[in-house]
C-alpha cells in the first residue's frame, strides 16, 4: 500500500502500517522531507515514532519516494493523506493538494487499484475525486474510490493508528470493501491478540466526509463552552476548575475537554470548523452551523485575556490600542498548541506571545520541542533551552502550554529566578496551592 502525502498524517500512518507488517511506500513531492524519512528522521515531533521508522526501514517493509510512477506500480491500495488547509481568500478548505495528488496518481496507475481518502475534506469531495479518477485514469482499469477519515491526536498518534477507537469505512462495491478490510487486517489482528474490539462504522461517502469535521466541531464547542464559563467565573468570582469538575461528573457531559485556558489551536480544529461553516453555507444550510462562529470567537477572545491580565499584573493601562508593556520582561513557557508535539500551527501559546511582544514586552520563550518551528513564525523574541534560562529577571511568567515539564516544575526551586514571583497559568495546569505556598502570586484562567 502507499500513503500519498508524508506530512504528519501520511508519515505516521505509513510508519505504523509498516509496523503492522504491511509493505508500505510513502510518497511526497517534498524531496527534503522524503530524504529525511528515508534516512530515519521523522520531520516532526511525535513520541516513539522515530524508533518505529528506523526499525521498519531496517526491516525492509518501509520506503519513501517522490515518484508517482513508482507509487502507482507499487501499491494496490493508495491512501490520500495530503493537507487541506484553509484557503487564503476565505474560510473554505483548499483542495488543490488533493486534486494534484489524485490526478498524478490516477494517470500513472498500471492496473486496477483502490484510492482511499483520509484527508479531512468538505462533503462532496469523494464524488469529485471519483470524477478526477475518471478523467485521468485508464477507464479499462476500473479504478475505484473509497473513504476512511483519520482521527489522529497529535502526541498520541501512534496509538490512534495501531489501536483506533473506531474505523469509518465508505465504499461502493464488494471488491472495494474487501480491499479496504484487507488493508486494515493488521489493525484487527492486533486488536484480537490484545482481546479488544475495533468498532467499525460502514457508511456512505457523505457521512464519512462529515464524521471528522463533526467530531472536531463538537470538541471545539465543548472547549469554547468551558472557556465561556471561565469568562463568567472571572466576573462572578467563581472557580471554573471546580465548576468543570462538578458538571463533568454528569455522565451525559463527562470530564474530558472541560479544562479552561487560552483555547484550542493546531492544524485541525480551527480550520476544520471554518471550512465546515463555509461548506454548509454553500449547501444552503449555513444557519445550522452559525453557532460555530461564536465558538471561534470565544476561542480567539481567550488569547486576548492573557494580554489584559498581564497588563493588569504589570500595572499598565489597557487603552484602545492595547497596553504598553515596554520595559517589562516576560518569560513564556510553551510555544506549541499542545504538549508532546512540535506543531505551532495556530498555537494559542504563540499567538499570546505575539500579542505580548507587539505590546512592547521583552519576551523570553522556552518550549521542550517547538522552538525551531516557533522561530520561523516569530523570530523577534528570545528563545532559551530550559526553564532556568528563560525565567531570570522576569517581571511575569506565563505558562501557555501544559507540558509535563511545566506541570511538575518545582515552584520553590524556581522562585529565586524571576524579578517578581508572578505567574499566569494559561492552561490551569499548575498546582495553585503549591505555587502559592512557594511564594508565587498565582493567576489561573477563570479562577479567583
Image (cartoon, rainbow, N blue to C red):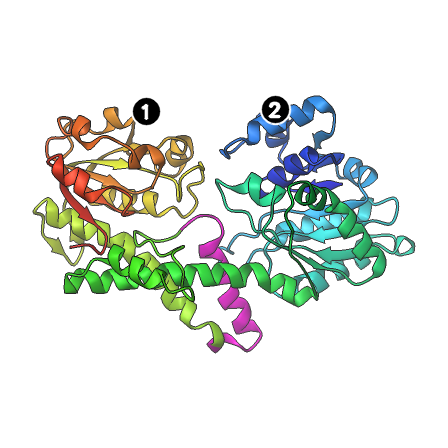
Residue sitting at x 73%, y 34%: 21
Does residue 36 sit above or below 311 in this rendering? Answer: above
The picture quadrant where one finds residue 53 is top right
Residue 310 on the magenta segment:
no
Residue sitting at x 75%, y 45%: 185
Q: Residue furthest front?
A: 195
* Count of residue discs: 2
**Is residue 29 something one can see in this rendering?**
no
**Going from the N terminus, do you reach mark 1 or mark 2 first?**
2
Task: Please name the residue that numbered disc 1 is placed on.
Answer: 385
- Going by the image, does 319 lie left or right of 258? left
Q: Position of residue 117 (x, y in %)?
A: 68, 53
Q: Secondary structure at mark 2?
A: loop
The picture quadrant where one finds residue 392 is top left
Q: Residue furthest left?
A: 315
Nearest to the observer: residue 131 or residue 159: 159
Q: Secondary structure at mark 1?
A: loop
Dot 1 and dot 2 residues touching (CB under 8 Å)? no
Nearest to the observer: residue 214 or residue 112: 214
Q: Position of residue 7 (x, y in %)?
A: 58, 40
On the rendered image, what quadrant is the C terminus found in? bottom left
Residue 266 on the magenta segment:
yes
Magenta segment's dominant SS is helix
Give the residues drawn in magenta, as a range: 265-287
Amino acid at each position: 500500500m502507499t500513503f500519498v502525502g508524508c506530512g504528519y498524517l501520511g508519515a505516521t500512518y505509513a510508519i505504523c502500517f509498516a509496523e503492522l507488517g504491511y509493505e508500505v511506500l510513502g510518497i511526497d513531492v517534498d524531496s527534503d522531507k522524503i530524504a529525511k524519512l528515508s534516512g530515519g528522521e521523522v520531520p516532526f515531533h511525535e513520541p516513539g515514532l522515530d524508533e518505529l521508522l528506523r526499525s521498519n526501514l531496517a526491516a525492509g517493509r518501509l520506503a519513501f519516494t517522490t515518484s508517482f510512477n513508482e507509487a502507482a506500480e507499487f501499491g494496490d491500495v493508495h491512501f490520500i493523506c495530503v493537507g487541506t488547509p484553509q484557503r487564503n481568500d476565505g474560510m473554505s478548505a483548499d483542495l488543490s493538494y488533493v486534486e494534484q495528488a489524485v490526478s498524478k496518481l490516477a494517470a500513472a496507475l498500471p492496473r486496477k487499484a483502490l484510492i482511499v481518502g483520509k484527508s479531512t475534506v468538505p462533503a462532496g469531495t469523494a464524488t469529485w475525486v471519483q470524477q478526477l479518477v475518471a478523467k485521468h485514469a485508464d477507464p479499462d482499469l476500473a479504478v475505484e474510490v473509497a473513504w476512511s477519515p483519520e482521527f489522529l491526536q497529535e502526541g498520541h498518534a501512534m496509538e490512534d493508528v495501531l489501536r483506533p477507537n473506531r474505523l469509518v469505512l465508505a465504499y461502493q462495491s464488494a471488491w472495494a470493501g474487501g480491499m479496504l478490510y484487507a488493508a486494515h487486517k493488521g489493525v484487527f489482528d492486533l486488536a484480537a491478540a490484545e482481546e479488544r474490539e475495533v468498532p467499525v462504522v460502514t457508511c456512505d461517502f457523505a457521512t464519512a466526509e462529515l464524521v471528522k469535521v463533526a467530531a472536531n466541531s463538537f470538541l471545539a464547542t465543548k472547549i469554547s463552552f468551558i472557556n465561556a464559563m471561565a469568562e463568567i467565573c472571572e466576573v462572578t468570582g467563581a472557580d471554573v476548575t471546580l465548576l468543570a469538575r462538578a458538571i463533568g461528573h454528569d455522565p451525559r457531559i463527562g470530564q474530558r475537554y472541560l479544562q479552561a485556558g487560552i483555547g484550542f489551536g493546531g492544524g485541525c480544529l480551527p480550520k476544520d470548523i471554518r471550512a465546515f461553516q463555509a461548506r454548509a453555507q454553500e449547501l444552503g444550510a449555513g444557519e445550522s452551523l452559525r453557532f460555530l462562529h461564536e465558538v471561534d470567537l470565544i476561542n480567539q477572545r481567550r488569547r486576548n485575556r492573557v494580554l489584559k491580565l498581564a497588563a493588569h499584573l504589570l500595572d499598565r493601562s489597557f487603552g484602545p490600542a492595547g497596553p504598553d508593556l515596554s520595559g517589562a520582561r516576560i518569560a513564556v513557557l510553551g510555544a506549541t498548541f499542545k504538549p508532546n508535539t512540535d506543531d505551532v500551527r495556530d498555537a494559542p501559546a504563540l499567538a499570546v506571545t505575539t500579542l505580548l511582544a507587539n505590546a512592547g514586552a521583552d519576551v523570553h520563550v522556552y518550549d521542550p520541542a517547538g522552538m525551531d518551528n516557533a522561530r520561523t513564525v516569530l523570530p523577534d523574541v528570545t528563545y532559551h533551552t530550559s526553564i532556568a534560562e528563560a525565567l531570570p529577571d522576569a517581571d511575569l511568567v506565563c505558562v501557555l502550554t501544559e507540558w509535563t515539564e511545566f506541570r511538575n516544575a518545582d515552584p520553590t526551586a524556581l522562585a529565586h529566578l524571576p524579578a517578581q514571583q508572578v505567574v499566569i497559568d494559561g492552561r490551569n495546569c499548575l498546582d495553585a496551592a503549591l505555587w502559592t505556598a512557594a511564594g508565587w502570586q498565582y493567576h489561573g484562567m477563570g479562577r479567583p
